[in-house]
Image: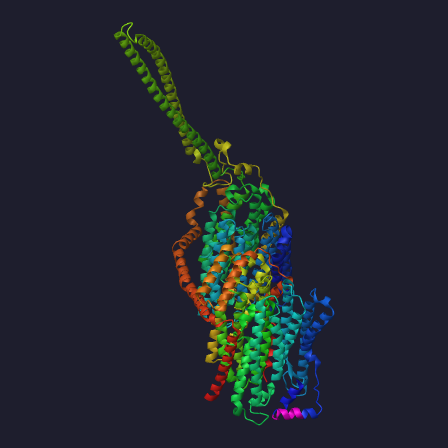
């Protein structure tokens, strides 16, 4: 039965290859079902191997399966082989088990995605890589898997790469992990240099000097800190939430991120030979990560970001456990964490799916009624992570706290505070998401702003129209005034004409030459004057009319100015996203702008959050059972109930620390932990459901050190770091590429120089050959003479 | 054949006297073990039958029947190999049971030929080459309108000559094999009747080949004169002072030396090692492309087979120290000159010709190590045999792609023709890329381990010269990367060239030709390529006609290249046996 071990990674690998070839043709949903079947087959093979291993005597539970010799190179020989032992099979069981459920879930979640089959192709490749990592019989195979899962993580985070933010999140994960991988490689080199082998069978049984072991442990710690998102390399994990939610659940919560812990656990004999301070470094690094990430989780508003920081925090717990020599609790919590964290992520995915891709918890609330299955299972996950007995998280977390107490009381305190914070922020999440008023339909500040923008725009348009009216009217007035002047001139002219004519007539005498003419002229002028005067009168009244119009237009401008000023002044008086919400906080009043709300708001009013399809809820239910009952694996009451501890014993080489705390002390610790957790839950209920206290005072940005570190790092990388990279790039371009290009140019020049020797003439070639024959003959003869 | 072998067995008597004696006495007919001869007989007889039958039944000329027939002959030859190997191993176990330890080898036809695991390895490679080249030839002849069975018949006969050359126990038989191999290839080179290039190539190859054969024959004569023997064992014995004629070899060593030099010229010509490579670019450029694939694979395999037998067995003892240094020099210069000159070519067939010179250089690096009496000798022999295996697949695959891209007329061989190939023919381009990476010697390809092993063997010799040679080979490999990657880049980065780009290229090339060595034909070829470029602009719109068989060969070759790169120890046992056969 143990011989089936190779099937475990072979199933998803075959699935991957088939999907590469035929994935597109299979399409939706066949590709998804196919991939699920592949990982399911892997799970069944794992179960078969597991049963086979159970059948062996505990001391015989090792099995090496060599597929072929991969790199035969003198004394350095690497096999493609598998190392089957309780530890690796435990990992395989939950990787394939949880993996199968997440594959199934993805069929529903990825429904309608353009790259449906590609998604499953990556998932299967990930599963194959992860299983290689876990099952490899030497560090190189593990590294192969290590890089494989890293590559898949990159591909899946940036799965929706059309959005640049997703693509850069993928890059961030990849680059950050490179730092850790460097440690992995150096650690491997050092191990090989020291014991001449990288096979686990040799590594785990060799004696290593304390100094070397310490350095090796620290190098592998760097690797593990990268992959498992510990201080200072955790920054990629919150960003990794850009990927599809099943990916967050599978890779960035349940499996890949635990591989650092797996690696350290696997190498427990090396840890045991290292200086004690090295393991203390692991424990403190884990404890600080747990605390810092938990603090950051409290102020997150994105449903997945909370879970991301929570994952970082829980991984810190695992490091804490490994650091204090609590390998069994570490694996125990790793498994239960895989259950409840996968459950929580998938639940959040179901919420996001049902909420039309909404991830902001301030826009949720009251979903328990709309999504009963999701809510019910999520609550189970919450109780598990909050450490409420008898859910699985309680048992595993309590074990870790016990070992921490046994090692260092300060470590216990950090762990305990983290547990309180965890209970608090998870309760906050559950309340904001599932209880209280459904805030989904509320207008957002953005939408209200948009409405105000619409109003302001309208006012502005009015103003512009009025201003234009003023301009036109003023021009008309000017024109009318000009006309008026003209008319006035005409009247004056007419009057002077009349006067002149009259005086001329007086000077003349009747019968004189032209007398009649003058009489006619006077007559005409006398008639012209009143005509001109009438025209003048008309012009005057028209001018007055126009001036009135200008006045009117000007007053209209003033009016619109007031209007748009008003619009600008009231726009942000309404509550918006910047404000903290509790479960029952009021919806913003939008009556003032109701007619002008944007389309996004209108469309949302027609949409109803709904429960997800069965392919998504079925895995939730299964995981909820696992998260609830996972504690049965390792109940603390009697030695016989330590199933997991007994099972893992052969893999740990008696490196598990023995706890010296008395039974009553253990009970005390458990009671303190439970009471602490419950009080944190109660506090969260008070704040977020009852509205006691101001959430803004609790969700302090200055406590979210993790977020601060992220932005500091980003600033450094964008500033001085960038200059450094540019410098390195310049060096590379100038000197390295210069050398390469120079060599190429030199080669080309040499070739050109040699070219004329190929003349193309047969007789010259013949001469060349004959000459060569002569030279070769001469060489031999000369040698003869010389000897 | 029989007569001559008998003569050599009775070395020491006067030749004339022996001949005279035989005219009066009944000739003892040697017993012939037909099974061991099966591959040679199948190939040679197959060639003759093919010509005969297609003359009787003209209908059989078309419809791929000659291709099928040739492939069947090659396959049958391959099928016999495990049978013969089984027989050989039985012989050894029988011998071991009777208390006499011996290597698995059988002398045939009065010691004219020897069949051992080495023979089988070479035979296998030649049969594979025949099969693959025939498959490429099928589409090629159809496209060029040259369908006739003679191509295949010559291919088969040439292959049988190659096996004879590699399995000859007697130098005269070596010569026979060499000629059977070569003459058929001379004809094949000029068989593209409508291309004057092809005629020229065949003619040049023939003239220069005849010259080198003359040297070879003269070398045999001198060696015979000095040692009184033409058999490998006889010469080797004589070298160790067991001269049948009672002459000490030292007394005749100047004669042996000159004879050795002449033999080296003959083999150096066939494997196209510097400075006897001089014919290679012209012949490769002009010959029909699938035939170039055959030259680069089967001819080279056979020539190296013959060379290893003659130089490692007959001259492997005391004299090895004399020729090893010379081979070392030829190896290093072949690698460097081949790589350098390959870079400046604009015609891909010429590029590959120089590349094949560089590859011959790498194999000679292995030969240098193979002659070492230390453990490096075994590494070197194995390295050369592995190199032959890898290079057979890589070169035939490469020339299969070049055949396809050459389009009708077999003339579209500028590197420009490969622009944007990845977009138009993704599978073909992918296979070609793999094959080129293989030739570069990139990890995870057969080429990597081939180069790695010869270089490692040279270093293992642990002499200053060995280290220098290993270093030179590494430099050559680095230069080589540039030339292959150039083609890969053209395939994947650039799309079909614009008219303007084509014309600009032509102008530049012509200016180049006018400025430098205007009268040198090589530069004429360059401007010829440039004209081709501008023509390409016109033909690039036409879809490339990819025969499925040729595509299959390219893909298969690429697959084997990767397979051997990932599992370099496939068939390691057979390889080790073959290498051991050369130790006597």
Q: Using the image as rendered, state which of residue B504 and residue B76 is in the foreground.
A: B504
**Quadrant where the image shows the C terminus of chain B:** bottom right
Q: Quick check: A362 above or below A629? A: above
Give the left or right position of residue B385, taking residue A488 as reference. Answer: right
Q: Residue furthest top?
A: A510
Q: Main secondary structure of the magenta part?
A: helix
Q: Residue furthest right?
A: B57
**Quadrant where the image shows the N terminus of chain B:** bottom right
Give the left or right position of residue A298, taking residue A499 as reference. Answer: right
Image x and y of residue B34, in percent: 71, 80
User: Image quadrant of residue B58?
Assistant: bottom right
User: Image quadrant of residue B206?
Assistant: bottom right
Image x and y of residue A432, in percent: 52, 43
- Read off the magenta span: B12-20
Image x and y of residue B333, in percent: 48, 75
Per the image, is B13 magenta? yes
* Residue drawn 28% across the image and 12% down it: A500
Q: Using the image as rendered, state which of residue B364 and residue B535 is in the foreground.
A: B535
Q: Residue furthest left?
A: A507
């Amino acid at each position: 039965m143990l011989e089936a071990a190779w099937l475990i990674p072979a199933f998803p690998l075959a699935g991957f290859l088939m999907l590469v070839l035929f994935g597109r043709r299979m399409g939706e949903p066949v590709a998804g079902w196919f991939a699920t079947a592949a990982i399911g087959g892997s799970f069944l093979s794992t179960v078969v191997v597991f049963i086979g291993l159970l059948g062996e005597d505990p001391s015989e539970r090792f099995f090496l399966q060599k597929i072929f010799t991969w790199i035969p190179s003198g004394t350095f020989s690497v096999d493609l082989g598998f190392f089957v032992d309780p530890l690796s099979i435990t990992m395989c069981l939950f990787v394939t088990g949880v993996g199968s459920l997440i594959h199934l879930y993805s069929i529903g979640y990825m429904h309608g995605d353009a790259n449906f089959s590609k998604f499953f192709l990556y998932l299967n490749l990930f599963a194959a890589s992860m299983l290689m990592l876990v099952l490899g019989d030497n560090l190189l195979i593990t590294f192969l898997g290590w890089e494989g899962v890293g590559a898949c993580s990159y591909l899946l985070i940036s799965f929706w790469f059309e959005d640049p933010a997703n693509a850069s999140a993928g890059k961030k994960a990849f680059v950050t992990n490179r730092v850790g991988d460097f440690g992995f490689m150096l650690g491997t080199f050092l191990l090989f240099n020291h014991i001449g082998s990288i096979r686990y069978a040799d590594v785990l049984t060799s004696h290593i000097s304390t100094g070397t072991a310490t350095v090796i442990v620290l190098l592998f710690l760097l690797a593990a800190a990268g992959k498992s998102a510990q201080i200072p390399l955790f920054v990629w994990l919150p960003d990794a939430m850009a990927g599809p939610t099943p990916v967050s659940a599978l890779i960035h919560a349940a499996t890949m991120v635990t591989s650092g812990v797996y690696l350290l656990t696997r190498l427990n004999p090396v840890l045991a030979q290292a200086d004690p301070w090295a393991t203390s470094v692991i424990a403190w690094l884990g404890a600080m990560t747990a605390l810092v990430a938990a603090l950051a989780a409290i102020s997150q508003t994105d449903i997945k970001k909370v879970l991301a920081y929570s994952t970082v925090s829980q991984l810190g717990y695992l490091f804490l456990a490994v650091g204090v020599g609590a390998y069994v609790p570490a694996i125990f919590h790793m498994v239960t964490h895989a259950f409840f964290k996968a459950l929580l992520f998938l639940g959040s995915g179901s919420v996001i799916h049902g909420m039309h891709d909404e991830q902001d918890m301030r826009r949720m609330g009251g979903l328990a009624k709309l999504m009963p299955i999701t809510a019910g299972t999520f609550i189970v996950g919450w109780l598990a992570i909050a450490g409420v007995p008898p859910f699985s998280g309680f048992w595993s977390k309590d074990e870790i706290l016990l070992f921490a107490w046994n090692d260092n009381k300060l470590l216990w305190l950090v762990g305990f505070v983290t547990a309180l914070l965890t209970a608090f922020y998870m309760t906050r999440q559950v309340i904001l998401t599932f209880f209280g008023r459904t805030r989904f339909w509320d207008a957002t500040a953005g939408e209200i702003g948009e409405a105000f923008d619409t109003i302001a725009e309208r006012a502005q348009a009015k103003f512009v129209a009025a201003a234009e009216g003023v301009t036109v009217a003023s021009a008309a007035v000017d024109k009318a005034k000009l006309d008026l002047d003209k008319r006035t001139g005409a009247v004056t002219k007419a009057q002077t004409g009349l006067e002149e004519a009259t005086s001329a007539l007086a000077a003349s005498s009747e019968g004189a030459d032209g007398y009649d003419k003058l009489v006619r002229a006077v007559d005409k002028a006398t008639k012209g004057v009143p005509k001109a005067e009438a025209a003048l009168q008309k012009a005057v009244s028209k001018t007055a009319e126009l001036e009135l119009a200008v006045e009117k237009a000007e007053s209209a401008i003033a009016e619109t100015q007031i209007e748009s000023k008003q619009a600008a002044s009231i726009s942000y008086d309404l509550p918006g996203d910047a404000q903290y919400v509790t479960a029952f906080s009021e919806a913003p009043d939008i009556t003032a702008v109701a007619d002008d709300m944007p389309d996004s708001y209108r469309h949302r009013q027609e949409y109803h959050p709904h429960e997800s399809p069965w392919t998504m809820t079925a895995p939730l239910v299964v995981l909820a059972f696992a998260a609830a009952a996972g504690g049965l694996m390792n109940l603390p009451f009697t030695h016989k109930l330590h199933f997991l501890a007994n099972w893992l014993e052969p893999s740990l080489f008696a490196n598990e620390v023995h706890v010296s705390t008395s039974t009553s002390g253990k009970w005390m610790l458990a009671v303190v932990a439970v009471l602490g957790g419950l009080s944190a839950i109660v506090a969260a209920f008070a704040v977020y459901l009852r509205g006691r206290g101001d959430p803004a005072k609790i969700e302090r940005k200055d406590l979210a050190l993790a977020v601060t570190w992220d932005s500091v790092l980003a600033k450094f990388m964008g500033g001085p770091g960038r200059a450094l990279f540019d410098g390195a790039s310049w060096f590379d371009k100038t000197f390295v590429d210069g050398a390469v290009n120079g060599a190429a140019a030199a080669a080309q020049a040499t070739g050109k120089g040699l070219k004329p020797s190929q003349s193309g003439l047969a007789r010259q070639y013949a001469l060349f050959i004959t000459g060569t024959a002569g030279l070769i003959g001469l060489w031999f003869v000369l040698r003869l003479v010389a000897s | 054949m029989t007569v001559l072998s008998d003569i050599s067995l009775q070395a020491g008597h006067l030749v004339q006297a022996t001949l005279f004696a035989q005219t009066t006495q009944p000739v003892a007919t040697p017993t012939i073990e037909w099974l061991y001869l099966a591959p040679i007989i199948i190939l040679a007889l197959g060639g003759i039958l093919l010509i005969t039958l297609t003359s009787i039944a003209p209908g059989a000329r078309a419809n791929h029947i000659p291709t099928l027939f040739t492939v069947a002959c090659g396959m049958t030859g391959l099928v016999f190999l495990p049978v013969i190997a089984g027989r050989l191993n039985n012989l050894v176990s029988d011998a071991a049971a009777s208390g006499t330890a011996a290597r698995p080898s059988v002398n045939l036809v009065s010691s004219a030929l020897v069949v051992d695991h080495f023979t089988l390895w070479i035979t296998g490679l030649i049969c594979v080459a025949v099969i693959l080249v025939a498959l490429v030839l099928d589409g090629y002849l159809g496209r060029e309108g040259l369908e006739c069975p003679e191509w295949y018949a010559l291919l088969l006969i040439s292959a049988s000559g190659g096996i004879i050359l590699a399995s000859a126990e007697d130098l005269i038989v070596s010569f026979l094999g060499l000629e059977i191999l070569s003459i058929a290839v001379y004809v094949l080179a000029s068989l593209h009747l409508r291309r004057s290039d092809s005629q020229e190539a065949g003619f040049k190859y023939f003239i220069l080949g005849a010259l080198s054969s003359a040297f070879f024959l003269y070398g045999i004569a001198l060696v015979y004169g000095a040692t009184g023997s033409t058999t490998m064992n006889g010469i080797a014995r004589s070298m160790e002072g067991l001269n049948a004629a009672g002459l000490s070899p030292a007394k005749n060593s100047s004669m042996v030396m000159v004879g050795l030099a002449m033999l080296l010229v003959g083999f150096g010509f066939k494997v196209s090692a510097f400075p006897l490579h001089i014919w290679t670019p012209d012949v490769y450029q002009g010959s029909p492309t699938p035939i170039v694939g055959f030259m680069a694979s089967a001819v080279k395999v056979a020539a190296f087979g013959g060379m290893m037998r003659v130089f490692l067995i007959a001259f492997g003892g005391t004299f090895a120290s004399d020729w090893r240094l010379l081979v070392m020099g030829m190896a290093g210069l072949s690698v460097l000159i081949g790589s350098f000159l390959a870079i400046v070519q604009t015609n891909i067939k010429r590029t590959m010709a120089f590349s094949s010179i560089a590859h011959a250089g790498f194999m000679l690096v292995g030969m240098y190590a193979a002659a070492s009496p230390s453990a490096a000798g075994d590494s070197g022999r194995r390295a050369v045999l592995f190199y032959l295996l890898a290079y057979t697949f890589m070169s035939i695959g490469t020339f299969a792609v070049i055949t396809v891209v050459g389009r009708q007329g077999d003339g579209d061989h500028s590197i420009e023709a490969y622009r944007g190939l990845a977009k138009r023919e993704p599978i073909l381009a992918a296979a070609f890329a793999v094959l080129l990476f293989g030739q570069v010697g990139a990890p995870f390809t057969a080429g990597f381990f081939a180069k790695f092993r010869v270089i490692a063997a040279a270093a293992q010799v642990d002499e200053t010269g060995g280290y220098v040679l290993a270093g030179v080979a590494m430099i050559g490999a680095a230069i080589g990367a540039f030339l292959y990657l150039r083609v890969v880049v053209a395939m994947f980065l650039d799309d079909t060239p614009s008219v303007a780009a084509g014309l600009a290229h032509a102008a530049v090339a012509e200016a180049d030709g006018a400025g430098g060595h205007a009268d040198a034909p090589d530069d004429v070829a360059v401007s010829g390529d440039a004209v081709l470029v501008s023509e390409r602009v016109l033909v690039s719109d036409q879809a490339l006609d990819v025969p499925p068989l040729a595509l299959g060969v390219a893909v298969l070759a690429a697959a084997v290249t990767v397979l051997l790169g990932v599992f370099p120890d496939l068939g390691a046992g057979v390889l080790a046996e073959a290498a051991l056969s050369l130790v006597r």
